[in-house]
């Protein structure tokens, strides 16, 4: 079936599937390490309470059948183990049907987590991982050459990721049109990385060149994905280069790496490694791929319409299974950076002379002298939501109070999400939150003070709070 398969893309298939499995592994590990404090039975947004409010058909998940923290841990660690096996090549060591089943189980386990994750799992890269995961199921294994239809669906996905991001910028903040957004972005992005300070201090003319290049890669290059080789390969390589630039300049969980992995599926490696002829695929597999392709094309109507809309939405799913979604990021850019600083005290009653001690977060800015760390592709969910909370208390309405309550209780699962707990022996009596304005220091300030950030107090974010009834430390 020469029309159905593309034997010259066998290396592209391997790079895509192994890379995707590696990102699944990161996602499941993040879920296993963070879920108890975020969505566990005693978490800030407990899954059992959420499941009582939603209909199963709108939120397909294993946890409608049963939920306990132990069961969630089994799901997360099972997903991690299966992802690791697929990274190691398990999908190519078994028959085609079994390989597809393994990828389907991996997808189903992560779908179950995303659909109960609530605010903590509301990021576009969750849907992107699931949508790419569906295509990985259909892509087959060593028993057959990659199906042409699935390779085109991967290009359609990559097109929507890049073109959608480009359009949302062009339609959004004026700074994208006058090429000045990068005067602010590296400083105000959700979680700067260790090189973000240096990127911020690049000459402003170079920032304008960066924005112009970004527009070219996101608005012109995606169209070239649908042209013959080697033009499509060149287009994919330009996207990979742009995504690597973003990897160096910030922390965006696995968004950039996943985009790179999807781009691998476009690159024709046959000039280097040659073709990899395989037997004709079985008829049942051809039928499944054609039927799935037809379904995806039908479901693509709303995402395609969204691209053309003047009211384009970012990062939206149109079905409960996240089969076909719309993507986009940074339609607007902040000009200043505000950060919430959480402090506690063990004074029985706070007074003007009270000593407040600051909690330290792993990724988000806190101590001005601490250089931002690199965490991506790992996703620090609490740190990301703290960035949104600083933009507006409305983003934190559901979880900020429970977060503070757990600090007052000394909840160990919550404290594990933090870098530094200033109350290692017993919980504080009071916790407060203050809003600070952060900016990167200048070269001169860095040399004189050793500080990467300069911060000034803006206002009180939350007045001192205490537990109504003291409780023993939670474990």
Image: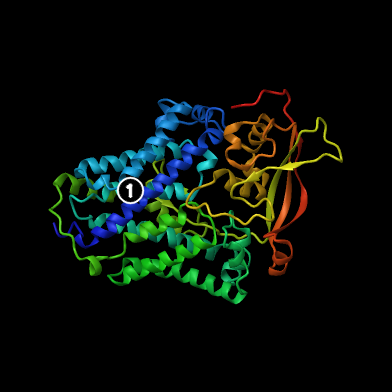
Near-viewer residue (416 or 323)? 416
Task: Report the quarter where the C terminus lies.
Answer: top right
Q: Residue 177: x and y, percent?
A: 57, 70
Q: Is residue 120 above or below residue 446?
A: above
Q: Residue 151: x and y, percent?
A: 28, 57
Does any portion of residue 182 appear in the rendered image? yes
- SS for dot 1: helix
The residue sitting at 65% across, 43% down in the picture is 394
Q: Is residue 470 above or below residue 378?
A: above
Q: How many marks?
A: 1
Q: Residue 423: x and y, percent?
A: 69, 36
The residue sitting at 39% across, 46% down in the picture is 24
Near-viewer residue (351 or 121)? 351
Near-viewer residue (319 or 345)? 345
| Residue lying furthest right | 352
Q: How is the image coloured?
A: rainbow
Task: Report the quarter where the N terminus lies.
Answer: bottom left
Q: Is residue 33 above or below residue 323?
A: above
Give the class, few, some or many, for how many residues have Cα within 10 Å of label 1's Cα (few <14, many ≥20): many
Q: Residue 342: x and y, percent?
A: 70, 43
* Residue under label 1: 87
Near-viewer residue (414 or 465)? 414
Does any portion of residue 60 appear in the rendered image? no
Q: Is residue 101 left or right of residue 249?
A: left
Q: Is residue 198 left or right of residue 310?
A: right
Indicate the quadrant where residue 113 lies.
top left
Q: Is residue 351 above or below residue 385?
A: above
């Amino acid at each position: 079936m020469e029309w159905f398969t593309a034997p010259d893309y066998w290396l592209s298939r391997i790079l895509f599937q192994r890379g995707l499995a590696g990102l699944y592994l990161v996602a499941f590990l993040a879920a296993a390490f963070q879920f108890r404090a975020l969505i566990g039975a005693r978490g800030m947004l407990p899954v059992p309470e959420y499941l009582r409010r939603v209909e199963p058909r709108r939120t397909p998940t294993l946890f409608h059948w049963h939920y306990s923290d132990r069961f969630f841990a089994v799901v997360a660690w099972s997903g991690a183990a299966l992802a690791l096996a697929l990274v190691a090549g398990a999908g190519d060591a078994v028959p085609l049907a079994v390989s597809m089943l393994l990828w389907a189980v991996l997808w189903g386990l992560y779908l179950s987590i995303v659909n109960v994750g609530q605010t903590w799992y509301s990021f576009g890269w969750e849907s992107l991982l699931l949508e790419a995961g569906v295509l990985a199921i259909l892509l087959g294994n060593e028993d057959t050459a990659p199906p042409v239809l699935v390779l085109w669906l991967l290009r359609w996905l990559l097109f929507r990721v890049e073109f959608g991001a480009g359009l949302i910028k062009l339609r959004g903040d004026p700074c994208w049109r006058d090429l000045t957004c990068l005067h602010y972005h590296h400083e105000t992005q959700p979680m700067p990385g260790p090189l973000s300070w240096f990127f911020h201090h690049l000459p402003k003319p170079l920032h304008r060149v960066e924005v112009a290049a970004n527009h070219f890669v996101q608005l012109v290059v995606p169209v070239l994905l649908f042209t013959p080789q080697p033009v499509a390969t060149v287009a994919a390589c330009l996207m990979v280069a742009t995504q690597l630039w973003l990897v160096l300049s910030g922390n965006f969980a696995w968004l950039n790496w996943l985009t790179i992995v999807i781009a691998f599926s476009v690159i024709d490696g046959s000039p280097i490694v040659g073709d990899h002829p395989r037997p004709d695929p079985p008829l049942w597999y051809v039928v499944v791929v054609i039927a799935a392709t037809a379904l995806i094309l039908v479901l693509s109507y709303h995402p395609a319409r969204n691209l053309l809309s003047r009211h384009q939405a970012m990062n939206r799913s149109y079905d409960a299974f996240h089969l076909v979604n719309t993507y986009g990021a940074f339609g607007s850019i902040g000009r200043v950076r505000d950060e919430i600083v959480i402090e506690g005290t063990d004074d029985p009653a706070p007074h003007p002379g009270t000593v407040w001690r600051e909690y330290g977060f792993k990724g988000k800015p806190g101590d001005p002298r601490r250089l931002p760390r690199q965490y991506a592709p790992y996703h620090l969910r609490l740190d990301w939501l703290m960035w949104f909370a600083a933009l507006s208390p409305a983003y934190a309405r559901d979880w900020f109070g429970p977060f503070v309550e757990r600090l007052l209780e000394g909840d160990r699962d919550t404290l594990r999400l933090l870098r530094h707990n200033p109350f290692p022996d017993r919980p504080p009596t009071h916790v407060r939150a203050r809003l600070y304005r952060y900016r990167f220091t200048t070269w001169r300030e860095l040399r004189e003070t050793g500080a990467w950030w300069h911060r000034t107090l803006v206002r009180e974010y939350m007045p001192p709070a205490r537990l109504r009834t003291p409780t023993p430390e939670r474990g």
